[in-house]
Image (spheres, rainbow, N blue to C red):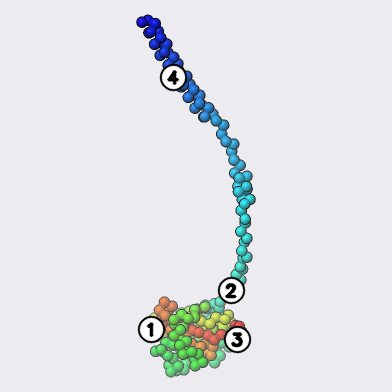
């Protein structure tokens, strides 16, 4: 009986030793994994260069150089307009004369006889875009006439065909009479360079402005 007890104790001790041995082996294996040497760092620049060896560079498209466009005629050169003596631009243009019979569309438009009858209507519809603008607000009649006529000459020299003349609605004039409104129409009718004009649409000044179409000067024709 005692012999069998001793044998059982030996078996238990052997089992215990075996279990301890397994645990030591498992621990040793984990330590080996943790101590595994790290992979040598990769040289990023070298890797990038190797990758780029197979890349075909894109050919750069030819660059287009945009040459500066000639500066348009100034909207108003007040320094010249104020107090300057009349020039050739004013020659042959008077402030008077009845032009009502020359106007159309209720007195809001004018079309010269050698222009298409619907020119004024097309002006108002935006067929030609205004390339320069003249504001006559604050000028006396003499100053406004000189400024307008000089402005038209400059626009023709620069090849600008469509312009906007802002004469105002007369709210700031004595007696609230739109003096420059009628004067501007009178001056424009006397200029042979003016093919047509029309009262501007509301978004561009309405009754306080005119859209004017000029003849294409000989120097700007292709």
Does residue 41 appear anywhere in the picture? yes
Q: Which residue is mark 2?
A: 69
Cα distance in 3D space between marks 1 and 4: 115 Å
Question: In this rendering, is residue 43 above or below 126?
Answer: above
Label drawn at residue 19: 4
Q: Which residue is mark 3?
A: 218
Identified at 43% across, 84% down, the residue is: 199
Q: Earlier in the sequence, mark 1 or mark 4?
A: 4
Looking at the rendered structure, the number of numbered marks drawn on it comes to: 4
Q: Which residue is mark 1?
A: 176
Mark nearest the camera among 3 and 4 is 4
Does residue 139 appear anywhere in the picture? no
Identified at 60% across, 71% down, the residue is: 68
Cα distance in 3D space between marks 1 and 3: 41 Å
Q: Earlier in the sequence, mark 1 or mark 3?
A: 1
Q: Earlier in the sequence, mark 2 or mark 3?
A: 2
Q: Earlier in the sequence, mark 2 or mark 4?
A: 4
Cα distance in 3D space between marks 2 and 4: 94 Å
Question: In this rendering, is residue 203 above or below 91?
Answer: above
> Residue 93: x and y, percent?
52, 91
Cα distance in 3D space between marks 2 and 3: 20 Å
């Amino acid at each position: 009986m005692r012999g069998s007890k001793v044998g059982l104790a030996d078996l238990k001790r052997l089992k215990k030793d075996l279990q301890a041995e397994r645990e030591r082996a498992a621990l040793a294996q984990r330590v080996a994994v943790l101590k595994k040497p790290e992979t040598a760092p990769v040289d990023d620049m070298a890797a990038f260069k190797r990758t780029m060896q197979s890349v075909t560079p894109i050919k750069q498209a030819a660059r287009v150089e945009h040459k500066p466009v000639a500066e348009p005629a100034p909207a108003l050169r007040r320094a010249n307009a104020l107090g300057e003596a009349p020039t050739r631009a004013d020659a042959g243009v008077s402030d008077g004369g009845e032009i009502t019979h020359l106007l159309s569309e209720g007195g809001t438009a004018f079309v010269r006889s050698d222009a298409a009858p619907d020119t004024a209507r097309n002006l108002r519809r935006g067929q030609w875009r205004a390339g320069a603008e003249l504001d006559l607000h604050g000028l006396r009649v003499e100053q406004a006439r000189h400024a307008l006529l000089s402005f038209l000459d400059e626009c023709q020299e620069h090849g600008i065909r469509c312009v906007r003349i802002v004469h105002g609605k007369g709210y700031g004039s004595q007696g609230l009479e739109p003096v420059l409104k009628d004067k501007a129409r009178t001056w424009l009718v006397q200029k042979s360079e003016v093919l047509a004009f029309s009262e501007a649409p509301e978004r561009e000044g309405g009754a306080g402005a005119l859209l004017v179409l000029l003849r294409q000067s000989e120097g700007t024709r292709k």
